[in-house]
Amino acid sequence: MKKKSIKEKSTSLFNLPNIILLVVFLIISLTFFILLNSQQGTGFGFSEIMFSIVFSIITTVFLLWIKTFIQKNSYLGSVVGFIILIVSVYALYLKYTGIYTIIFSIITSIIILVYLGYCFFKALSVKTKAKEVYYDDNPID
């Protein structure tokens, strides 16, 4: 019998969906600091731009790490993703308060939760297909 195999794509940092995630998080964080500056007059400069770049890179790398974690163990990876999301939103609320912080955290959390859900269900479907292939190749006589 010929064995069927399901190929898993390698997670690369420089593919189109990851670059889109990076740009989306960069735009969201820059918009947050611009709106915060217009409301409170805290100033918008080099440190805010650098923080936005670092935030977007760390968030994208975190999502890639969670994606590979979910591929290995779907439920544990999803729980770790939710816990890290809750901790990061709590840390944001320790530093900033106000309507722009709430909007920023809601938009960012929705994007992260959609991404986590997508990776979770995709990993479950791959595992289900792998089980079907295994049972199709090994019929019980």
Image (tube, grey):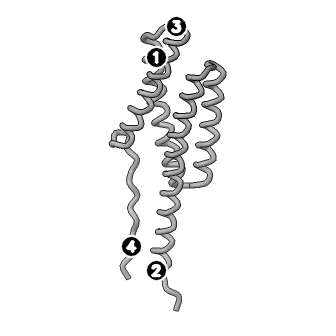
- Which quadrant of the rendered structure holds the N terminus? bottom left
Q: Nearer the viewer, mark 1 or mark 2?
A: 1
Q: Position of residue 129 (x, y in %)?
A: 47, 69
Residue 21 screen position, x and y as percent: 41, 37
Assign a secondary structure to mark 1.
Answer: helix
Label 1 to label 3, Cα distance in Å?
A: 10 Å
Which labelled disc corresponds to residue 41?
3
Spatial CA span between label 1 and label 2? 57 Å
Q: Which residue is mark 2?
A: 136
- Image side of residue 35 versus residue 93, left or right: left
Secondary element under disc 4, as helix, strand or loop, is loop
Return the disc, 1 or 4, that comes first in the chain's sequence: 4
- Within 10 Å of disc 1 (Cα), the crowding (few <14, some 14-19, many 20+) is some
| Amino acid type assigned to the residue bearing label 3 in the image | Gly
- Asked if marks 4 and 2 touch (Cβ < 8 Å), the reply is yes
How far, Cα to Cα, is label 4 from label 2? 10 Å
In the rendered image, residue 79, in percent from the top left (x then y), is placed at: 63, 47
Which of 104 and 66 lies nearest the eye of the viewer?
104
Q: Earlier in the sequence, mark 4 or mark 2?
A: 4
| Residue at the disc numbered 4 | 4
Asked if labels 4 and 1 touch by Cβ distance under 8 angstroms, the answer is no
